[in-house]
Image: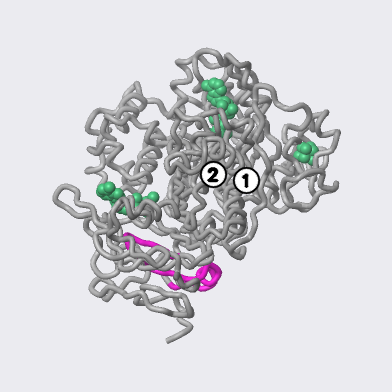
Amino acid sequence: MSPRRHTVDAFPDADELSDPLLQVTDLTTAFRTPRGTVRAVDGVSLSVRRGTTVGVVGESGSGKTVLSRSIMGLLPPHGVERSGTVTFAGRDLTAMSAKELRSVWGLQIAMIFQDPMTALNPVKRVGAQITESLRLHLGMDRGEARQTAAALLESVGIPSPEKRLRAYPSQLSGGMRQRVMIAIALACGPRLVLADEPTTGLDVTIQAQILDLLGQLQDERHMTMILVTHDLGVVATRADEIVVMYAGKVVERAPTATLFADPKMPYTRALMDSIPRLADPSGTRLATIAGRPPELIDPPAGCRFAPRCPWAQDRCRTSEPPLRTAGSEAHTFACWYPLTNGRPSVPVTHDGVAP
Amino acid sequence: MTDPGAPLLSVDHLTVQFRVGRGTVQAVSDVSFDVRRGETLGLVGESGCGKSTTGRTVVRVQRPTRGSIRFDGHDITAMRDRELRPVRRRMQMIFQDPISSLNPRRRVSEIVAEPLTIDRTGTPAERAERARHMLSSVGIDPDQAGDRRPQEFSGGQCQRISIARALMSDPDLLICDEPVSALDVSVQAQILNLLAELRAQRDLTMLFIAHDLAVVKNVSDRVAVMYLGKIVEIAPSDELYRAPGHHYTAALMAAIPEPDPGAPRGQTLGGELPSPLDPPSGCRFRTRCPAATERCAVEEPPLVEIAPGHRVACHFPLAGRTATP
Ligand SMILES: Nc1ncnc2c1ncn2[C@@H]1O[C@H](COP(=O)(O)OP(=O)(O)O)[C@@H](O)[C@H]1O
Ligand SMILES: Nc1ncnc2c1ncn2[C@@H]1O[C@H](COP(=O)(O)OP(=O)(O)O)[C@@H](O)[C@H]1O
Ligand code: SF4
Ligand SMILES: [Mg+2]
Ligand SMILES: [Mg+2]
């Protein structure tokens, strides 16, 4: 083995194996802009146990991508303030130098982006893009990297991999490009994969294939995964636990079955109800969430969801509900008037989600 | 003189081919369907199966290679631009990417009034007033939005603006080409409800195109399932869900990410749409079909009625679903 080659031993767990692989504590990420400070991620805490999948769900602009990038340490060099800690395998990533982080990216934690067309280099052949990180991180020679790249493409279900290595990204279908992205992300055997809307924009059939593939690779490689999406349907059968984000904050977190059976936060329920269900008769009116998420420069006081919440009371508009537990430690939510089995405890105060 | 019971739109044996290099793309192959007045027909299938080409050919942005299109009793297949102009006003189209389908240099009020401006309908003041009214009816505040430009709006708001624009000429037929595919589920629900309201208020007839069968079913009275340029199944929405006859329809249903952790995860359809330059022989779906036999490779299954209004093109339609012989 070449001396340059990193292995998992180069990054030993500093904690117990029973501890979560990733522990994010009070993470805040704010951008300074001419119009003011955008607090895109605001005091987020979450933990991910080894080998599990955590789904992170919320509407566009709720801070999911910034959270993922902030965990990775992949943020713009200027105009960003980050506080809080990101503990991965017992080490705080926020305390690492850029050089140390480079030994984490790809090798320990990898990210899969929503749009492979912008994440891939359009003028470079697929093969070169995969072998690049194999040679850089794992110190492989050209031939070895080439063989490994072909094997990787095969493992992500790409037919005639040798031929595809010579293709440019634009010559592949959307689904094939996302498979290439996955191959690149997994090239160096990361332990944690952050998949940021990996199937948004794909056909439902291809989405199912990509999600199946991620699940299968996760099992084979004992990977831990964070699956980011705006669609609760995507994570319903694929995540062990779900974290719901709204306007930069975690508003509810629970094991998947619990979240669907007993959502506490009205926003969670509203997200569920807005999805058309195949079993509903045609013409069924969908429940919608009135309005849009708030600006993060000057978010509303109190509960950030209050302006859109059908059950908001005066208290919601003045005082911010803290995260508290519902029954078990595993289920937490932030709401003054939580739902019980999906039903409200107070009368509807304005239009929004159908009760 | 038009018969009120006659369909508003009749597409007959429509074939659309594109010559590329030395090959021919079979984008739409012998597709026939009717859309009755006030009805919404859904068109569902994977990217590249010919949905947009079908929609574009109906509004005659695209010329058909063969077949005919009748709109409100008139054969518009070969009409010249001048004859087409009044017809085009009565059919409008909205698209998947609402932001890029709106002119970024124009104000929202101008964009919405434009169809009337082009036709020189009414005075500028009348046009502006109608645009304001239309914006309100799609849930956009004209006082706040009228002077702004499309980039200042979210995807959902831009889709509302393009709907307002499409409705300015008071069309009979609205073709919605993946209008919600680029939107969040929460915004998708708002747009689907808006379309349902507008349809009821204005007696609209719609052709609704999407790749998600749950979305299509929600808005459509009937659904046509397309695969590689062909309609493989067509049925009333609820019937299609209850008793899908085609293996591809079943696969599309299984692919929907249901928001239910207990839902059984169906068998995922493997592979991708084959090249329309060289479609498979026999049944075009056979290369991905779990039930394919040798017969499927040599004999093309015709679209046959298996129940009233329910037609399927498959040699071995799903078991127990063949109600009529
Ligand atoms: N580089 C940046 N500068 C300023 N604001 C940003 C930047 N990146 C993201 N934001 C803002 O942060 C918020 C959260 O964005 P994002 O994490 O992309 O949301 P999501 O992924 O949930 O759609 C948005 O309001 C977005 O405009
Ligand atoms: N102008 C064109 N020239 C060549 N091929 C085209 C053209 N327009 C569409 N196609 C091809 O026709 C097929 C059907 O395309 P389209 O109607 O856009 O499918 P869908 O809307 O279902 O995704 C695709 O293979 C597409 O590449
Ligand atoms: S009830 Fe109050 S606290 Fe709970 S979601 Fe609604 S506005 Fe927020
Ligand atoms: Mg994002
Ligand atoms: Mg299309």
**Residue drawn 78% across the image and 29% down it:** A302
Front in this rendered view, residue A223 or B269: B269
Q: How many marks?
A: 2
Read off the chain for label 2: B
Read off the residue under disc 2. Answer: B164
The answer to the question of whether label 2 and label 1 lie on touching residues, with beta carbons closer than 8 A, is yes
Read off the chain for label 1: B
As drawn, is B54 to the left or to the right of A36?
left
Q: What type is the residue that disc 2 sits on?
A: Ala
Q: Position of residue A168 (x, y in %)?
A: 26, 36
Q: Position of residue B16 (x, y in %)?
A: 27, 58
Residue B33 inside the magenta-drawn segment: no
As drawn, is A128 to the left or to the right of B260?
left
- Quick one: label 1, few (<14), some, or many (20+) residues within 10 Å? some
Label of residue B137 in the image:
1
Ligand 5 closer than 8 Å to label 2 CB:
no
Q: Quadrant of the N terminus of chain A?
A: top left
Label 1: state its secondary structure. Answer: helix
As drawn, is A141 to the left or to the right of A215?
left
**Residue drawn 46% across the image and 44% down it:** A199
| Residue B4 appearing in the image | yes
Ligand 5 closer than 8 Å to label 1 CB:
no
Q: Position of residue A181 (x, y in %)?
A: 38, 37
Residue B228 inside the magenta-drawn segment: yes
Mark 2 or mark 1, earlier in chain? 1
Question: What residue range appears in magenta?
Answer: B224-245
Residue B142 higher or lower than B218, as above or below: above
| Residue A193 appearing in the image | no
Front in this rendered view, residue B161 or B298: B161
Residue A97 higher or lower than B198, as above or below: above
